[in-house]
Amino acid sequence: MTIEVVGSGIESNEFSSGVQEIADAVARAVEDFGFRSGELRLVSHYVNTVFRLTTDAGRYVVRAHRAANRTASEIASELAWLDSLSLEQDISVPRVHKTLDGEAIAIAPVTDEETELPISILGWVSGRTIGDEKHPRDFRELGRMIASLHRHAQIWSPSASFDRPTYDSKSIFRLDFQVRMAKILGFNDARPIIEALSTLRQRLESVESELGSTSDVFGLVHGDLSFGNVLFGNSGAIPIDFDDCGFGYYLHDFSVPLAGGWVKPGFDERYQAFVTGYRQRHELPRDLLQHVPVFLGLRSAQLIMDYLGQVPWKQGIFDQYRTRLLPALEACDVSSDWIR
């Protein structure tokens, strides 16, 4: 009995760019988790290479962690939080499947590339994703789920070896962003964006000074709770893909799902549904919500920084600046009726 690697049906050659070698390494590694037979099918080959493993015991998500900025220690810490969250009764998360030795990750040599990849396996989560037609009830369920994450983060004490990144003004606004922006866009086009980002950084520093870093406002956050990373099922909203989890202000988890549509019609109703859902499970002081616009802008800033770190996509930078960053800065300067 063996682990069989099959095609995915994804357009183009899914076993190009080293994927075949990764798949072969993963097929060997899953045996460390106790699987002797099954079918591996490629799901995605982006930041990580992800497979669906189908066995007689059920279906699983297998991740080959390729991100250069994620160490084995950071991956193990992500899985430690998931392990703890799985014990909570009012939230569903993917369950961590461990090796026969009780470890959360296995190391798989990729012979042709002379590298080693951390491999992790999670239980398959059933649910549906939400497309463009998002309703207030979806935001209410999302708010309830995020509140459960934050409530758990406030009371959970990770081990001394817990290792995840921190999202703050120092880490998000990299020192070289102004120079790189000017190189990509040219000085004249880059100047207003650099000025807006610098203003946002100052506002975030002010918020950090005002709020401090006590556990009621700052702690573990998912970091990327877009609707693409949330499944909806009978148990409500289910968060997946904790690859970006780390330490930050809890408002950071508000900004990701809200930033995409907050300047579109119907935002106020969706926002109020989100806040109502959150308050059904966790305290949310009104004076904390006054900082929401800063974090909406912060989401835009993060996306702009991502563009700077990749192959330059000029239009993406301009779009984030015009449609999200500027409105967020404007909202910081007015009394917005929806912030309540």
Image (cartoon, grey):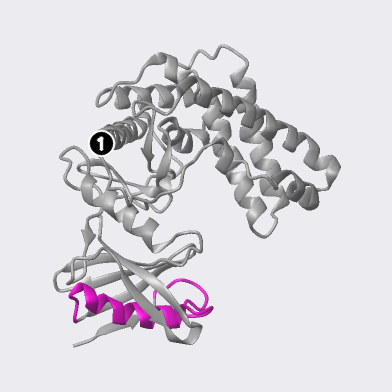
On whether residue 333 falls in the magenta region, the answer is no
Q: Residue furthest right?
A: 188
Side of 327 relative to 137 (left or right)? right
Residue 299 seen from this side = yes
Residue at 85%, 40% (x, y): give it. 188
Q: Please say if 196 is above or below 12.
A: above
In the picture, the quarter occupied by the N terminus is: bottom left
Q: Say which of 84 and 8 sits in front.
A: 84
Residue at 49%, 25% (x, y): give it. 292
Q: Residue furthest front?
A: 160
**Residue 201 falls in image quadrant:** top right
The percent position of residue 119, horizontal first and vertical second, equals: 34, 69
In the picture, the quarter occupied by the C terminus is: top left
Element class at badge 1? helix
Disc 1 residue crowd, few under 14, some 14–19, many 20+, Cα 10 Å: some
The percent position of residue 90, horizontal first and vertical second, equals: 18, 37
**Residue 196 falls in image quadrant:** top right
| Kind of residue at badge 1 | His
Q: Which residues are magenta?
A: 8-36
Query: Pointer 1: what residue?
Result: 152
Residue 340 seen from this side = no
Side of 26 relative to 301 (left or right)? left
The percent position of residue 104, horizontal first and vertical second, equals: 26, 63
Residue at 51%, 79% (x, y): give it. 13
On whether residue 9 falls in the magenta region, the answer is yes
The percent position of residue 118, horizontal first and vertical second, equals: 37, 69
Q: Please say if 118 is above or below 289.
A: below
**Residue 85 falls in image quadrant:** top left
Count of numbered labels shown in the rendering: 1
